[in-house]
Amino acid sequence: MHSQTVIDKNEMNEKTMKFLERFVKRVKGYPPGVCPLAVQLSFLQSARSQTCGKCVPCRDGLEQVEKMLRMIVEGEADRKVFDDMVELCHMIEDTADCAIGYEAARIVLESVEFFEDEYMSHIEEKRCQPEVGQKIPCVSYCPAHVDVPDYIALIGEHRYADAINCIRLDNPFPTACAFICEHPCEEKCRRDILDSHVNIRGLKKFAVDQISADQVKVPECNVATGKRVAVVGGGPSGLTTAYYLSLMGHKVVVYERRDHLGGMLRYGIPNYRLPKDRLDQDIAAILSTGNIEVRVNTRIPEDITMEDIRKEYDAVYISIGAQVGKSVDVPGIDAEGVYSAVDILERIGRGDIPDFSGKRVVVVGGGNVAMDACRSAIRCHADEVTVVYRRRQIDMTALPSEIQGAIEEGVELLTLNAPRSIKTDENNKVVGFEMQPQIISQYKAGKPGVVNANEEKRVIPCDVVLMAIGQDIVSEPFAEYGVNPRRKTFETLPTARLKKYENIFAGGDCVFGPATVIKAIGAGKVAAINIDEYLGYHHKILSAIDYPEPKENERTRIGRVHLTDRSARERKRNFDPVENGMTYDEAMQECRKCLRCDHFGCGVVEGGRV
């Protein structure tokens, strides 16, 4: 009986720590439309219920903090109550005996830092900030704010062309996103309350698999305005801006330095993830608006200067992306056999497939570029492929599905190993990769750091090293146009306009740094709206789609349909697409799972579209 009691206490301690960890994340990433102070109050109530009552700071202090926070939430507090609460939290953080007390106080103090504006609104205005209100989770979490519930309903009615046009109202890349979007829309899907979130990306893929995007007519353009806009960069952000400006009636000229449009969609994502013929379907649809002229193989400033562009056009949108790889300063980095993973992926995107037959390849990094590089190396017939990453596998920024796919295809992961040097022979050719083992350490900026382990360095033999430690922005040709010299990003106003120039706008990776495709698309959409306003218009792209009436919720608990891949032994031999689509029955079942939060529980979406 005694030993059972000890086990129960240990289990309770573990559960308590998991509880605290969950709530730290919840305070930082509260659901869309929810008052963060209300989330904080619920956490305090839960934490206080777990106090053992032995120490005064935890037993009595948390109760007082809860009362003061409730006064703030209900608009009954003044600045003194706020200051007293902060002071009390500092005292509890310093004196409480266990994690329940000091972690609860610390999280309140974190919320004061994160949400100071919200606290002041409750104290001074006696209400939440204006943007706090019921929002549809999937729409809110999509950077382009695509109307997810309506296009799922259209798929459920077998109206695939209408579903594609519904997506296009906010995102002109339905096919590309169907293959590679990181689907942040699923993060807070309310279906999780019942069983599991809806496979939104999988349904989008099902729709574009039924009818090619370039076979679905785009909306008619507005009356020509006579205005001309230059878009510098033909990637997802630039083409998104060009698409919406074209539909608004403006003439758009896209300048692209490469042979083809698409940016990193074409030259950074391998064909096995995004087939280029499918990408071309989206691009063909964008160009079918008729108001877009494309000038490829045009470099700035070699072929045309920014000053000439600025003078020739009524407005300019810069969307040059982040298309070169970063390196790391270690001995041997200039050896023969060391390449940027971004450069290798660009070669592959051009159809120039390197031959790694008989070679041992090391890929350094833990993001999606590293996964694309290592899986591509397998397809380039490398004998061995090893990924070296200085943190844990759980800390990798790559999608879990990409990591799993790499492991299935034979890639070895060497985590908790930091690069130290690249070993070379007398001809400066790569012969090995030296690593320093790491151990996990204190938290920094919200995640655990690493420090050198008290172990000897290790060397693994290799012939090729691919550096995949991040991407960089080539913004030197635009230095005079408000580029942050440290980050190499453009500094813009909330309207996407550059601070120094009235008619120049910028967006995508070259503003916020390397990110996701859907975030770049969302930035392009915002830029189009603001450029249109700058030109003196307020165009709306209206939908002629007759949306289905919402049906009663499907309340039966149903498992999530996961997309499957072709077998690893088959798919790793070539660059053919790896992912299978949904069957008809799977898609219809997944459509029925949507709870239609746009009608039941959140109200109808208004605004937010172009």
Image: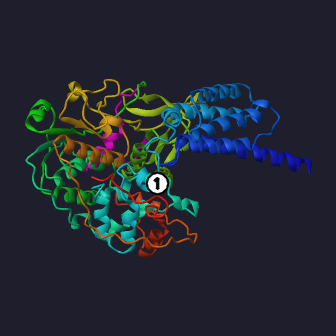
Magenta-colored span: 332-361
For the rendered model, the colour scheme is rainbow
- Give the percent coordinates (x, y) of residue 269: 34, 49
Q: Nearer the viewer, residue 311 or 458?
A: 311
- Give the percent coordinates (x, y) of residue 554: 52, 72
Q: Up-down: is 449 above or below 415? A: above
Please tell me which residue is depicted at 32% across the width and 47% down the height of the picture: 522
Residue 220 forms part of the magenta stretch:
no
- Give the percent coordinates (x, y) of residue 45: 68, 44
Q: Check disc 1: other Cα within 10 Å, few if <14, some if 14-19, many if 20+.
A: many
Residue 192 makes an appearance in the image: yes
Q: Up-down: is 325 above or below 142? A: above
Kind of residue at badge 1: Pro
Q: Quadrant of residue 309?
A: top left
Q: Is residue 298 left or right of residue 447?
A: left
Q: Residue furthest right?
A: 1
Please tell me which residue is depicted at 69% across the width and 32% down the height of the picture: 102
Q: Quadrant of residue 341?
A: top left
Residue 303 makes an appearance in the image: no
Residue 354 forms part of the magenta stretch:
yes
Q: Nearer the viewer, residue 280 or 88?
A: 88
- Give the percent coordinates (x, y) of residue 542: 24, 60
Q: Up-down: is 137 above or below 415? A: below
Numbered disc total = 1
Q: Nearer the viewer, residue 417 or 520?
A: 520
Q: Secondary structure at mark 1?
A: helix
Q: Is residue 282 left or right of residue 142?
A: left
Judging by the rendered image, the residue that carries numbered circle 1 is 137
Q: Is residue 276 left or right of residue 19?
A: left
Please tell me which residue is depicted at 28% across the width and 63% down the height of the picture: 165
